[in-house]
Structure formats: structure tokens, C-alpha cells
Amino acid sequence: MAHGGTEEWNEAVQNATTEISDKYPVEIAFGMADAGSIEESVRRLEGLGVEDVGVVRMFVSGESWYERTQQILGILEGAPSKGANETPPNTFMPMGFWKIETDIKFHLSEDGLADATEMDEVIVSRIKGLIRQPEREVAIVIAHGTGSDEEDSRWVKKITQRTETAKLTLGLRDIKVFTLREDWFAKRGEAESNIRTYMESVINDGLNPLVIPFRVHGFGPYARVLEGLDYRADKLGLLPHENVNLWVANQLESLRQTAQRAN
């Protein structure tokens, strides 16, 4: 499962499954836990005779749509029968919500990319590609964020943990993590102001900011948010990187072992 986006975005996710696609049938359900795309994948797997499915959720936060996905897959109660909510209004992408009727057993990953130690090396490699004078540079890591203050704080804490290897090895003046809280307009303005204020202070101190997006793919809205500020960025998200492929494979192996114990 992954959010999905442009053709390039989706292709990057598909490429991240190359390490497992030679061993297992792989389906990708794009969307924010959309029952429609998930069910299409489930039906194709049923046609192959699959009985157990490991569901790897490629979101930054493991909290994103976790309970909703459990309900759609029938692991938890709470999703209506199909037909009750197939075409929700006023959404920019489908978010169908119903219980999928199937005999498949699902084993659902809990962690997000912010929990993954595999992402530490991704951060290191992104910063390495931008470094010129590390003692005069500050890395600014920006993530999407969420509406809940408590959950957003967990995002910042976990992503900050992902930067520890870079802090210890690259010799930068500092590494700072922010969330933009992109879809919550009442809080986004303050978040955007905090990012710009910090970057302006860095620049005024004669330091050079390096901007690293902690996103599945791409630079999101950050170019517009940072307009007029002098910084360096390669505008790559976590993908493409071999450690994201590794994370997918490791997640699946953990789910495979869980399935074996359950059976």
C-alpha cells in the first residue's frame, strides 16, 4: 500500500518491490487506504490461489490509516458492507470504505518509514550528495506531518532518530526536523512560518541550508514554501534508494514469519 501520485511517483514505488517480486506475487494498492484499490488487488491475488497476504504499508507514519485498513480487511470490525460508501464525495482521490469479503488471511505491517532504521542511510546519502563545507552547513529535513499535535510530535521525534547517523558521521553544524502539516490549513501557516524563520536565521548566521524531504517520493510543495530562500536540494524523497527496497523486503519477511507462526 502506498499513497500514489504522478506516473513517476507510482513507478518509483513499483521499482521498490523488485527484490520481492521474483519470490512472491506482488500487488500495489495506491490511495489513502482506499477499499476499491485494495479489493482489486485482493481479487487478483485470489485468482492466483493466494491464501496469505503480507500487507506492507509504505507510509511515513505507521499510524496513517492503520485502523481503517484493518477494518477494510476484516481484521477489525467497523467497516460497512460494500455499497454503503463506494463513492465518497469531495475527495481528491478515492477513499472507499467497506469490508472486503474474502477468505484470504491478512498480515498487516505496523511500522512506517519513520520507524525504519533502513532510512538512516537514505538520509546520509541524500545529505552527502549536497555537502560542500559541512562545518558551515545545516540540513533541514521536512516531512508532511499531520493534524494531531500529539501525532505530529511523534513524527518529528521518529524522523529525528533517523538523522542520528548523519549527525554522528557527516560533520554538519546541525540537522533540524520540521513538519509542514500540509493538509491542515489552520496549522500549516504556523508550520510554514517556523520553517522559513529557522532557515532565515541559518542564512543570516552565514550558514548554508541543505533541504532534505522525508517523503516517499519527490519534493512536494517545498519549492513554493521556500521560495526566495537560498538553499541546496536534490529534491529527491526517500525513493529511489536501495534501502527502501530493502525495507520492503524486510517488512515482508517479518510478516511471512508471522504468518507461519499463525498457521
Image (cartoon, rainbow, N blue to C red):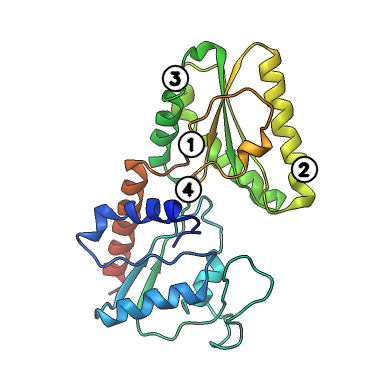
Amino acid type of the residue tagged 3 in the rendering: Leu
Query: Residue at position x 65%, y 52% from top?
Result: 146
Mark 1 crowd level (few <14, some 14–19, many ≥20, 10 Å Cα):
many
- According to the picture, the residue beneath numbered tag 1 turns out to be 162
Query: Residue at position x 32%, y 42% from top?
Result: 242
Going from N to C along the chain, the mark reached first, 4 or 1, is 1
Give the mark toward the camera: 4 or 1. Answer: 4
| Mark pair 4, 1: CA separation | 14 Å
Going from N to C along the chain, the mark reached first, 3 or 2, is 3
Marks 4 and 1: CB-CB under 8 Å?
no
Amino acid type of the residue tagged 4 in the rendering: Val
Secondary structure beneath dot 4 equals: loop
Amino acid type of the residue tagged 1 in the rendering: Arg
| Mark pair 3, 2: CA separation | 32 Å
Marks 3 and 1: CB-CB under 8 Å?
no
Give the mark toward the camera: 4 or 3. Answer: 4
Marks 4 and 2: CB-CB under 8 Å?
no
Mark seen at residue 154: none
Rendered image quadrant of residue 105:
bottom left
Going from N to C along the chain, the mark reached first, 1 or 2, is 1
- According to the picture, the residue beneath numbered tag 4 turns out to be 216
Q: Which x, y percent locates residue 214?
A: 52, 41
- According to the picture, the residue beneath numbered tag 2 turns out to be 189
| Mark pair 4, 2: CA separation | 23 Å
Going from N to C along the chain, the mark reached first, 4 or 3, is 3
Q: Which x, y percent locates residue 233?
A: 52, 29
Residue 74 is left or right of residue 95, and the answer is: left
Going from N to C along the chain, the mark reached first, 3 or 1, is 1
| Mark pair 1, 2: CA separation | 26 Å
- According to the picture, the residue beneath numbered tag 3 turns out to be 170
Amino acid type of the residue tagged 2 in the rendering: Gly
Query: Residue at position x 48%, y 31% from top?
Result: 234
